[in-house]
Image (cartoon, helix red, strand yellow):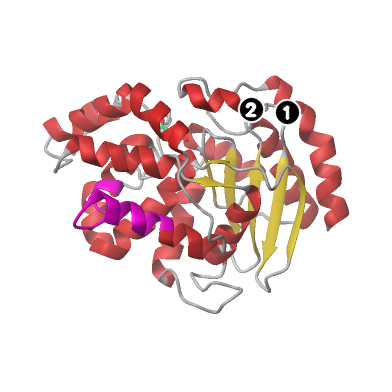
Amino acid sequence: MFNLLENLVYKNKDYGKEGKLASYIPALLKADPNDLGVAIVKLDGTEYFAGECDKTFTIQSISKVVGLILAIDDNGKEVVFDKVNVEPTDAGFNSIVNLEVKDTKRPYNPMINAGAILTTSLIKGETEEEKVGKLITFMKKATNNPNISINEEVYVSEKLTGDRNRALAYFMKSNGILNGNIEEILDLYFRQCSIEANAKDLARLGAVLANDGIIPWSGEKLIEKDTCRIVKTIMTTCGMYDASGKFAVRIGVPSKSGVGGGILSSVPKRMGIGVYGPALDEQGNSIAGIKLLQDLSKELDLSIF
Ligand code: GLU
């Protein structure tokens, strides 16, 4: 398996040259577009990896998975999906258009920015610090990494330039969909996007989801089985933005990407996969990472379909 992963990193690394780093968050421009790494964690706890799999990056939209899990845990699925829909969209990850044209004004799904800002607003806690603490504690457990923390530089960069997300949030407020202190909600959202992890961490989180919420290396239950089912379903239909359909056909594994270049994948009952490749395609997905996953899915027959 180590050989296979080494070969796939070598084979697909150059695709990074065809992509671009996310530039709308200036701090993300510090990444090396030629990086590519992959890690696999099987449900017996064995780990395989190759390439840049120890390098940390901000998980960005991958945090939408964590926000959704905590929102369901805190409120129950009925409350959450009363406010955010579960339908894929062909509009981009930060699009505002659907918030106006649909009757219900609900964001299309929790994997795009509008939906994620909404689910993040549902995480319960007395203070913002408490809510951030819940996100970090969850990540530490799910990744078996006590060093998980927030990249302050990226957080500040996002906060300074996050006007599109501000627009989405205030638009939802004006529609009566998003309630509470909007600046605090956005701050929490920017902080969750700025959580740092590496490909191995993502693979472990993917393994927990693949194992129906039971942490493979400790046996502890971290997520309800039904929540895992819902989250993996939404990852499949909406996790790769407006390329989710193509990704399902080509790779067929519940996955979530982020503009930091990470991809979290979870093959039910089999393994978690973490990929890092910061050069992005037009939809905002890791360009080399998708190519690598395509090969990996074929080699290991990973498609769930
Ligand atoms: N923090 C990013 C944003 O809100 C996340 C986007 C992404 O990874 O798709 O724009």
Quarter of the picture containing the C terminus is: bottom right
Task: Report the side of 9 relative to 91 (left or right).
Answer: right
Task: Report the side of 137 relative to 43 (left or right).
Answer: left
**Residue type at numbered disc 1:** Asn
Residue 125 at x, y percent in the picture:
22, 58
For residue 47, say whether it is visible.
yes
**Residue type at numbered disc 2:** Ala
Chief SS of the magenta region: helix
For residue 76, say whether it is visible.
no
Residue 228 at x, y percent in the picture:
45, 64
> Which residue is located at x 30 percent, y 47 percent?
120
Q: Callout 2 environment at 10 Å: few (<14), some (14 to 19), or many (20+)? A: many
Contact, mark 2 vs mark 1 (Cβ under 8 Å): yes
Give the residue number, with chain letter if any, for mark 2.
279
> Which residue is located at x 46 percent, y 20 percent?
24
Give the residue number, with chain letter if any, for mark 1.
34
Task: State the SS at label 2.
Answer: loop
Indicate whether 58 appears above or below 268: above
Residue 80 at x, y percent in the picture:
25, 54
